[in-house]
């Protein structure tokens, strides 16, 4: 497939205009052809796992094993899933009829690409988050403009190498280097058809305001202050170990990580004893890496200090790092917190979590749902029935039972929250659908009829027929419905007997 495109150093407006031409030809290809290109990216990434993980570690600060577990492996699983499932997601599908009176109308849903997809990705998971979004956008038939986080440009180059291996038509995938404050306004003003943003709630709100005049659709994956509910019958060792990882992996810089640990009072003491011992055992440089930026570390320091100044106490901290990196912040577990503290009201994007006693499951749900953030949550219980009863009442986009944070690695499940955590979905079929415009096509299966009974002119016959339909739809007693059925049937038969469609 050969189409003209803008030069690599062309202004963004020219690149978007050129990408529209490329995208039209790309969308016209069968899904199998598009998938054939992306298979090359899959093979390239599989062959360059270590180099990719190293690029992430250098700039993001992740430990090598964290980069492998949380970014590279999920990316591989994600592209494999979308290559297999994407054909089904792109295929049109019929809609079941809703009323026998409209038996001659057959509807089907048709999925089409938006055109130009803009993606602004974050620095906390700089590879895995944009990777799946780019893959879905391309497989759905779109062109892509990706703005990588300014503090992780090397990860952007690693992404560029993966998609360069696909030998895509020039101009279809574009890596854009712009300051963060400029990227959103530039994408919106220059005509992207849909924008995906992962980042802070404040920035997401600004983008919504900018998008409003053009009604540019947005998918926003924003902040989180997730709660883990530890029931009275929980396996304390498993819950403590799982919550420890979900709270402090990636130095706590996970929007879906645990921040508020709500523990039933009956097991509060043994749980706290178990998790504090685990926190103290974390090894800086081996289990816990540095934060990505010094600025973010300083933000977390201020939030933690505000909690302590208001009466919170440190139950446990991991050993202080002696590795010469000022970005290290120890894993910190707080107790005696109150509802007005930052740990309860804000997203604390770092390795700080609080353990809070609750009287029962209902109190735990009330405390969990008090946060304006509702990205993910978890319930820890030996009783699957109990956990499943609680899960629907937990206000979160993803609820995990006896686990936390890992759902982002399940390509088949949607990802996204409510409230200040954003809108729309990424991942899974729901995320793939965000890359597509949905339209319905309705066929008439009675080509011999010259029109529909409700068309002009309005006659007494039409009025009697419509009243019979209304009576039939009303669900009155059987005799009245039977009478209405025959009246409606006579109406349709008499109407369609008239080839000119005028009825009597």
Image (spheres, rainbow, N blue to C red):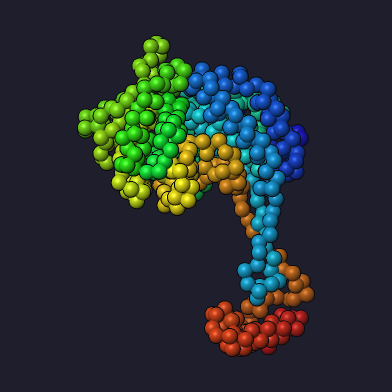
Q: Nearer the viewer, residue 426 or 254?
A: 254
Q: Nearer the viewer, residue 175 or 342?
A: 342
Q: Point out the image quarter for the N terminus.
A: top right
The residue that appears at 62% across and 26% down in the rendered structure is 160
Q: Is residue 126 visible?
A: yes
The residue that appears at 41% across and 36% down in the rendered structure is 236
The residue that appears at 50% across and 20% down in the rendered structure is 63
Quadrant position of residue 194? top right
Q: Is residue 357 above or below residue 313?
A: below
Q: Is residue 62 above or below residue 340?
A: above
Q: Is residue 476 above or below residue 238?
A: below
In the image: residue 134, left or right of residue 26: left
In the image: residue 350, left or right of residue 311: right
Q: Is residue 422 above or below residue 292?
A: below
Residue 345, horizontal then vertical, whole percent? 31, 39
Q: Nearer the viewer, residue 464 or 21?
A: 464
Residue 113, horizontal then vertical, whole percent? 64, 46
The residue that appears at 32% across and 42% down in the rendered structure is 266
Residue 54, horizontal then vertical, whole percent? 56, 18
Q: Is residue 200 visible?
A: no
Residue lying furthest right in this view?
A: 448
Q: Point out the image quarter for the C terminus.
A: bottom right
Residue 349, horizontal then vertical, whole percent? 39, 31
> How many numbered markers are drawn?
0
């Amino acid at each position: 497939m050969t189409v003209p495109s803008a030069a690599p150093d062309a202004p963004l407006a020219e690149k978007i205009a050129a990408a529209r031409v490329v995208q039209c030809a790309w969308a016209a290809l069968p899904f199998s052809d598009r998938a054939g290109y992306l298979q090359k990216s899959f093979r390239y990434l599989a062959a360059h796992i270590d180099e990719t993980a190293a690029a992430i570690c250098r700039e993001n600060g992740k430990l090598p094993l964290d980069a492998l577990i949380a970014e590279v492996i999920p990316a591989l699983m994600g592209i494999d899933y979308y290559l297999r499932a994407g054909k089904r997601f792109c295929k049109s599908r019929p809609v079941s009829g809703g009323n026998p009176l409209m038996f001659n109308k057959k509807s089907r849903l048709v999925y089409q690409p938006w055109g130009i997809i803009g993606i602004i990705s974050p620095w906390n998971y700089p590879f895995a988050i944009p990777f799946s979004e780019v893959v879905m956008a391309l497989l759905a038939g779109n062109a892509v403009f990706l703005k990588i986080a300014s503090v992780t440009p090397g990860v952007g180059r690693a992404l560029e190498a993966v998609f360069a291996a696909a030998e895509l038509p020039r101009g279809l995938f574009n890596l854009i280097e712009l300051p963060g404050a400029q990227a959103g306004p530039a994408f919106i003003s220059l005509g992207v058809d849909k924008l995906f943003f992962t980042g802070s709630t404040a920035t997401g709100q600004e983008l919504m305001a900018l998008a409003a005049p053009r009604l540019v659709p947005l998918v926003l994956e924003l902040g989180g202050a997730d709660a883990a509910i530890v029931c009275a019958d929980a396996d304390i060792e498993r819950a403590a170990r799982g919550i420890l990882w979900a709270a402090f992996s990636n130095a706590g810089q996970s929007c879906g990580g645990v921040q508020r640990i709500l523990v039933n009072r009956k097991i509060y003491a043994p749980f706290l004893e178990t998790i504090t011992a685990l926190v103290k055992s974390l090894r800086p440089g081996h289990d816990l890496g540095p934060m990505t930026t010094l600025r973010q570390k300083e933000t977390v320091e201020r939030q933690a200090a505000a909690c302590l100044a208001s009466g919170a106490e440190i139950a446990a901290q991991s050993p202080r790092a002696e590795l010469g990196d000022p970005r290290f912040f120890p894993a910190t577990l707080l107790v005696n917190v109150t509802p007005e503290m930052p740990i309860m009201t804000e997203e604390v994007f770092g390795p700080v979590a609080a353990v809070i006693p609750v009287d029962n499951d209902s109190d735990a749900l009330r405390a969990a749902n008090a946060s304006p953030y509702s990205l993910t949550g978890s319930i820890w219980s030996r009783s699957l029935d109990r956990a499943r009863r609680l899960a629907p009442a937990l206000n979160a986009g993803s609820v995990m039972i006896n686990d936390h944070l890992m759902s982002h690695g399940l390509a088949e499940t949607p990802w996204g929250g409510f409230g200040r955590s954003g809108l729309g979905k990424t991942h899974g079929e729901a995320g793939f659908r965000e890359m597509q415009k949905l339209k319905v096509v309705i066929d008439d299966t009675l080509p011999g009829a010259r029109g529909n009974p409700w068309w002009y002119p309005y006659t007494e016959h039409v009025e009697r027929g419509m009243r019979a339909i209304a009576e039939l739809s009303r669900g009155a007693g059987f005799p009245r419905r039977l009478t209405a059925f025959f009246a409606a049937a006579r109406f349709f038969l008499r109407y369609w007997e008239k080839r000119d469609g005028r009825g009597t």
